[in-house]
Image (tube, rainbow, N blue to C red):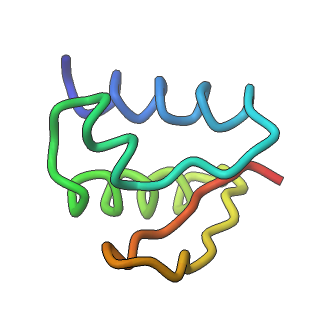
Amino acid sequence: MTGSERREQIRSKLSQTQVPVSATTLAKQFNVSRQTIVGDISLLRAHGTAIVATLQRSEEHTSELQSP
């Protein structure tokens, strides 16, 4: 899977859910690092995709992502 294909799937997944999805969860689903997902989210935002990120207070300190 290319990076652009992964970003499209991330965008689709976020637009279809009503609950936040953690970057760690997405990383596991796509078999990439959490940092790769963070970069993908940055690129999606730069291209106009509205994504809300909130800090989840947990041991992992992961971000939760959701389309508004």
Residue 27, picture quadrant: top left
In this view, the residue in front, 4 or 67, is 67
**Considering the image in quadrants, where does the C terminus appear?**
bottom right
In this view, the residue in front, 41 or 13, is 13
Kindly give the residue lying farthest to the top in the view shown: 1
Count of all numbered marks drawn on residues in the image? 0
Query: Above or below — where is 4 with respect to 44?
Result: above
Kindly give the residue lying farthest to the front in the view shown: 59
- The residue that appears at 48% across and 69% down in the rendered structure is 63
- Left or right of residue 16, residue 68 in this image: right
- Left or right of residue 29, residue 33 in this image: left
**Considering the image in quadrants, where does the N terminus appear?**
top left
- Left or right of residue 37, residue 51 in this image: right
Residue 42, picture quadrant: bottom left
Measuring from the top left, give residue 46's x and y in whole percent: 52, 62
In this view, the residue in front, 12 or 63, is 63
Measuring from the top left, give residue 43's x and y in whole percent: 42, 56
- Left or right of residue 19, residue 57 in this image: left
- The residue that appears at 32% across and 52% down in the rendered structure is 37
- The residue that appears at 20% across and 24% down in the rendered structure is 2
Measuring from the top left, give residue 52's x and y in whole percent: 69, 65
